[in-house]
Structures are given as C-alpha cells and as structure tokens.
Image (spheres, grey):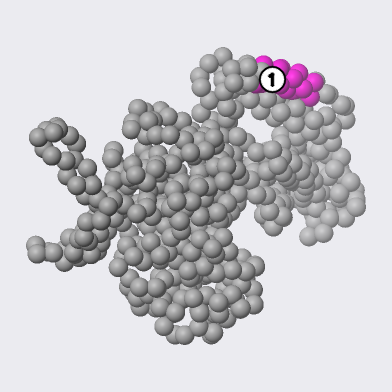
Amino acid sequence: MAVGAYEGLVGWRYILRRRRRPKVLVVGLLVLLFGAVLLGGGLYLHFQSGAELSVFGNTPGAASALMSAGGGVLAFGFCLSLFGALNTFLTVFSAFSAFMVTIGVAEVILVLGVMNGFQGDLRAKIIDTYAHVVVEPAETGAHIDDYRAITEQIRGVEGVLGATPTLKTEVMISAPTNLAAVSLQGIDTASIGQANTLPRILDHGCLEVLDDPRHTCRPWLLRTAIKLERPTRFQAMLFDAPHLAFRIPPENLPPVLPEGPAAPAQAEDAPEPADEAEDEFAFPEPALKRAGPPPGLMVGAELRRNLALWPDEVINVVSPFGELGPEGPVPKSRPFHLAGWFSSGMLEFDSKLAYASLDAVQRFMGLGDVAGAIQIKVDDLENARGIRDRLREALPATLRVTDWQERNRNLFSALKLEKIAMFLVLTINILLAAFSITSTLVMTIIERKREIAILMAMGSAGGSIVRIFMAQGAFTGAVGSTIGAVMGLSLGLALATLGLPLNTDVYYISAIPVDVRVLDVVAIIVVALLVSLASTIYPARYASRLRPVEGLNAE
C-alpha cells in the first residue's frame, strides 16, 4: 500500500518531538568519556607491565579490572548516547523503537561478520593444507605409478596454477618422553609450494633438509629462537652456526640397523676390539658406523610441543604395516631426525601432521616410485568444480578427482546451516523491536483519538488513516535500520582492519576474524524494514475502525 505525501507528513509529525531535550545525550556523552578514561588507564597499566594485550584471558589485576570496567561503561555510555541522540528529535516511545531496531540490525551484522570470518579462516586453512583439487586412485589402497607424467599433464590444464605429488600413511612417532599418532605425508620439496602453503608457514628449518639431511638452513629461514628449558644431553651439543640452529654431528648419532634381513659386513676400517685385560670397564664402541644422519622430518608445532622435541633430535617412526615375522606381523620402525616444524594456525593439523621427502616415505613403506595423490591449486577457488570436471575428462577412469567442496561437504554444509540458524535466532531482536513499534503506535492511537476523529470528520477515509500509521512505523524502521547498518558496517570494518587481539597462549588465532558481506547487510536491512512495516498493520487497522463520535468524546 503506497503512502502519499499527505499521510507521510502527518505520520512524521506524530513521531517528532516538539521541543529538543538533549539532557539524555549529554549524560550519555559524559558516561562515554568516563568509560574512555577508565579504559585508557587500564591500557596504560597493561602496557607498562609488558604483558600481551588480549580481549579475553588477560591476567587478573588492576589493569584487567580497569579495562573490563572501562569497556562496560563505554558500552553503556554508547547506548545511552545513541538513545539520547534519537530522543532529541523523536518522542520517547518512537526513539525507543528506533533504538531497538538499530541495536538489532547492528548486532546481526556484527555476528554474521564474525561467523563469516571464522568460516573463511577455517576454509582457507583446510584448503591450503589439502589443496583445491585432489587426484587420487579410484581404488582404495592403490597408488599412482606414472605420477610424474600425470602431474605434468595436469599442469597443462587451463586454470591450474600448480600440482605436486604426495604419499600419505598413518604412523606412530615415538619420542623419548611420549608418543603420538601422526599422518605422515611424503612430499616433493621442489613442487610442494605450487599447491600447499607449507614453505610459507615454517617456524624452524627448511625443506631442503628433507632431501639432504646434511643441509644447513640459511639463518633467515630459522625464525624461531630456541630456548633450552630442560637439562638434556642436547645442551652439551655445539652450535654449528651463530643463528642457534642445532646440528648433531654425524658421529654423535646412534647407529641404525639395515632395513634388509641380512646385516652388512663390518666396515673395513672398524677398530679392532680392545683387549679386555687392558680396560675391563671400557664402554664398547658400536660395530657399525653411520654414513650420514637419518632422513629429515617436519612436524607441526603443537606435535613438537607435545612430544618435547628439539631440533635434530632422532625419533622413531613406527608403522603397523611391517614385515611378516616368525610370530606374525612385526611393526616397521625407522629413525628420522627433526628437521623443523610448522604452524598452520589449525590445532588439528599442527598436532597430527608430519612431512618427509617423497623418496623417504616410499622407502619407509617399502614401495617403488609411486604417489598416493596429486594436490592441485587453481586460479579461481569458486571455479574449482569446473576445473575438476575438465580433469575428469582428461585423466583416465582409474583416477578419482575431487574438489575442496566435495571433500569437505559435511563440514561446510554444517557451517552454512549454523549461519542460517544464527540469522534466524538473531532476527528475534528485530522482532522485539517490532513489538515496541506496535506498542508505540497503540499508545499514539490512545493518546490522539481526538485528532484521529477530527481527521475522519474532515473527510479522511479509513485507508488514509491506515497509511498514516504505517508511515509512522516505516519511518521508525527506516531510521533504525539506516543507523544500525552504518554502525554495523563501521564496527565490522574497524574490527577487520584493526582486529581484536586474542591471547595466543589460550586461543589458536591471534585476532578475531571479521568478514562483513554486502549481501548479508542488504538482507538484514530488508528484513528489518519488512518486520517494521508488518508491525504497523494491527495498530493502523485499529485506528481506521475508530468512529469519530468516540474520538470527539475522548478526554
């Protein structure tokens, strides 16, 4: 139902305040200033203590108490100032209705922005670890024999930025203090950066050590300062470089038994055993000498912390798929040395993933030159499904091609449903604002029965009276939606730019991610306007059914 200029003018005059009363606004601004002083004092004390700033998880004390009190007073002062600003030109009931709509719209925008931020952050970490598109054998347990030729063929497909082969197996890592179940992945260090962010998330070490255990990483690739927190045999080791990169000399590494069933002959230059009579308590020297250190292994930062590992420490990797012994299957165990660690930003990956060279994993599993999968990176993430279809047509039927949406369908479907449910739940705040609009219009009708009767006596039809009160609700909803959208967008963009810091010792991310999307903002504004307009239907129809005689006799 269209609202004419006459009805709009009358409706607007009903909700305007005749006299400006900025008292509430002044009080709100004073409260806001007091909260800012408290918050500033808390921040000053916090920075003086040298502690890390965090929204949650700050150390209890005077600084934390002042910041908490200042934040609460700031929020109260902001709400009071907003209501006072609306009350300077709107009546009390109309200002309260517009305030409710404003808070509801801004709250929904911020919450959905935070949910979008977390969802995007989670999606980025999963995709960066497992690639955009993955090619693997269609048969479970099979391997790709001609993976080199297939990888080159995939790189020639339009839209593909890079591809790299991998080989995955489930193992147990045994350290001197603990053990853990790990997903061991063999990677091609020369091409892993084409489809994976591993080279960019290394905290210590470099990928060259995986191919050559004797390789020494350059100083600028070692970004983590090593702190000796426990007395171990590693404290006695010498540094081979000033950048605190621990290296174990090959002669200090323990001997490793050969992988085959037969032991090799003793080295020609092995020292002859000393006469027992000369030194009865002499420590026996090993009969076998190592030609070099064991293969390198990259682990997640959380896994390294759980196992209490140190750079170049030798650890055992155990696989249940071993050889068949006289009494049954015997687990396979091989030594690796810790070449470094990485931080993906996701706890599950940093505590369950380990990387070694493709050749080392192939030899560990007793396989030939094969790969278990080929990870692919595409130029457009949203077009990964189209590239997947082109790869399915180009590759043989013995290979299965899946994209990131297909591989994580359950997770992202659950996140989408959660977002929809949260939107519906938060819409209740807008419905509460709609009830306030309804109550405001009913109070206006009761208060202005005589004016309504005069309008009807002068010839105003029932439809005109309906449009007048619908104009009131529409004006209130439009004011609240506009201010709420501006507030939500401003706060969302500020948080996305500046960020809310989190305590990294407690949380696995450094700041709360915020991603405000235009489509969400438009949908929220439309819903707020529709709800505000719908809340005026009952009061408007009630006013149109008043008889002029009842209104003129009203006191």
Q: Is residue 11 visible?
A: yes
Say left or right for 316 vs 159: left
Give the vertical position of 359 relative to 125 (above or below). Answer: below
Residue at point 41%, 60% (across, down)? 185
Q: Label 1 crowding class (10 Å Cα cut-off): few <14, some 14-19, many 20+? A: some
Above or below, 64 relative to 181: above
Three-letter code, disc 1: Gly
Q: Which residue is mark 1?
A: 40
Q: Position of residue 353 (x, y in %)?
A: 41, 53
Q: Position of residue 83 (x, y in %)?
A: 74, 30
452 and 150: which is toward the camera: 150
Q: Is residue 420 visible?
A: no
Region of the chain picked out in magenta, as a range: 25-43
Kindly state the secondary structure of the residue where label 1 is placed.
helix
Residue sitting at 58 percent across and 31 percent down?
Answer: 55
Q: Position of residue 332 (x, y in %)?
A: 24, 59
Q: Nearer the viewer, residue 9 or 142?
A: 142
Quadrant where the image shows the N terminus: bottom right
Q: How many marks?
A: 1
Magenta run includes residue 405: no
Q: Magenta stretch mostly in which secondary structure?
A: helix
Residue pictured at 66% horizontal, 28% vertical: 75
